[in-house]
Amino acid sequence: MKSTKAVEQPNMKAHKLGIVGGLGSLAGGDLFFKLVKSRAVLEDQARFHFLFEQHPFKDVLLPLDAQASMTSRKFYVFQVCKSFEQSGVDAIMLPCFASHTFRTEIQEEVGVTVVDMMDALVQHIHQVAKRGSALGILASDYVRYSGLFERALGDDYRLVYPDDATQTMLMDAMYGPDGIKDGRLEGVPLESIHQACLSVQDNGATLIVPGMTELSLVCADLQRRGIPTLDINEIYATFATRGPGNPRTLPFKLGIVGGVGPAATVDFMGKVVANTPAGCDQDHIKMVVEQNPQIPDRTANLLRAEADPTMAMYATCKRLESSGANAIAIPCNTAHAFVERIQGHLRVPIVNMLTETIEWIKKTYGSKEPIGLLATSGTVKSQVYHEAANRAGLQIIVPAPDYQNLVMESIYGERGIKAGRTDGLCREQLLTAAQHLAEAGAQVLILGCTELPLVLDHCDSYELNGREVALVDPTTILAQKCVALAQRPSLGKSNKAG
C-alpha cells in the first residue's frame, strides 16, 4: 500500500519521507496521520512528500516476548528501506521500538538515513524531565530486556518498569485477543494499560515513557485521566519534519566490472585487499563485483569487428552504479578502448587504468626512454595506450608482428593463460616477446593485458638475458589508485538526515 501527500512545486526542494508500515499497522497509520497534521507540514504543505509502504509481514501478530526472533522483522525492514532508497527518499521513518534495537544494522546497509526514533524521544525527554528523575517505561518484553532504554536513558534517569504480574497484564493488553493491536482501544485493554501506568507511578515515576508505538493510540485517553505520558508518534513526527540534518557520508564502495577475464578479476580484488592499510576486516574496502564473462570479447571486436561489447559493459556499469558504487574499476586493458563511449552516460567515474599507469610510469621512471607494451593485438590496434602516452610525453613501442603473435598465443593459445596455464609454453612465449622489446631499447615494460601479471610480477628490476627492465602491472596501479580514492572522504556518498 502506498500513499502520498503533497506535490513538489517548481524550484522548491521537497522533503521526501518514507514510512515503514506493517510492523504495527495501526501505529504506522497513526504516525502517518500525525505527520500530515504536524505544524511543519501544515505551514508548508507543498514541500513535504510522504511515502507509506506496508506489505504482508508474517510475524506482525506475534507477541514481542523476551525470546522473540528479529530475523524476519530485520529482513522486512531492510526490503522496505531498499525500496524507499530506490524511490529517492531523503529519510526513512521506522515506527517500531523493536526494530530500533537493530536500526544501526539496517543503517549500515542502506544509503538513506533511517531517522532515529530513540534520538527523538531522548531529546524530548531532556526538555520535559529533570535529569535524575524516574521514568516509567512501558515496553514489550523484548524491548524491555534488550537494553534499548538503558543505553539511551540509563545514564541520566532512573528507569522504572512494571512488576512481573503487571508486565504480563500489559503484554496481554497489547498482544492478546482483542488487544490494542487488534483495534480495541477501550475497555479491558485500556484499563490494563492505565493500571500499568499507575504501578510505575507508585514506584516513583514522574513521566510515563512509551516503549510500544501502539501506546500513541491511547495516549490522549491516558492524559485525560491525568497520566503524564508521551505520544511517541507525535514526537517522532515533529522530529522528522524539522528538515534535513547533517549530511551522512557512506563508506566508499568500489564497483568492479568482472569476467574480463575471470581470473584477472580475482587477481585484481586480491591486489585491492593487499594494498589496503587495514588492521581488521572492517577496515577493508567495500566491493561490489559483477562477474560477467558473457561480455563479448573486446579483442575480437577490435580486430575482426565481431560482437560489440559496449552495451554489455555499459549495462554492467549501470548495475554497479545502482548498487551504490562510488567509482568503477575495469581490470581489463582492452576494455578501456570502450570506456570513453560509456563514461559520459554514467554518474560515477570509471577509474582509467591506462591513464593511471602512464602517469605512474612518468612519475617513477621519467619520460626519456621508450616504454614497451605487452598487450593483446586489440589493445595495440586501438592505440589507447599510445594516446595516453602521447598526452604524457612518453613513447610507446610494441613488438614486431612475429613477436606480437607470441604474445597473443601466450594469452589465447590452447596452453595459454586464459586456458588456465601460468607456466611452461605461455611463459616462454611472453618472455621471448619481452626480451625483444628490451633489445629494442625499452627499460620499462607494461604488462598490458590483465592476464599477464598472472605469469610475471610487478617489479622494479627483472633480468632478461643480462638486460634489466622494470615490469609494470596496470592492475596493481589500478588497485593502488582505488585504495587511495577510498581514503578520500569526499568520494563517499552523502545523504541528508531527517
Image (cartoon, rainbow, N blue to C red):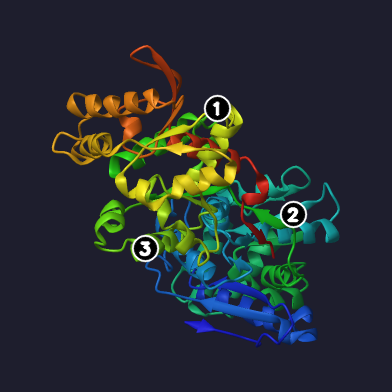
In the figure, is residue 223 to the left or right of 429?
Answer: right
Secondary structure beneath disc 1? loop
**Crowd tier of the residue under label 1, counting other residues whose Cα lies within 10 Å: few below 14, some 14–19, many 20 or above:** few
3D distance between C-alphas at marks 3 and 1: 39 Å
Q: Which quarter of the picture shows residue 338?
A: bottom left
- Relative image position of residue 45 (x, y in whole percent): 73, 86
Instruction: List the residue tagged with mark 2.
Output: 135
What amino acid is at disc 2?
Leu
Instruction: List the residue tagged with mark 1.
Output: 279
**Crowd tier of the residue under label 2, counting other residues whose Cα lies within 10 Å: few below 14, some 14–19, many 20 or above:** many
Instruction: List the residue tagged with mark 3.
Output: 310
User: Of the residues under marks 3 and 2, which one precedes in the sequence?
Assistant: 2
Which quadrant would the C terminus be assigned to in this image? bottom right
Q: Decide: is 360 above or below 326.
A: above
The residue that appears at 43% across and 59% down in the rendered structure is 317
**Crowd tier of the residue under label 3, counting other residues whose Cα lies within 10 Å: few below 14, some 14–19, many 20 or above:** some
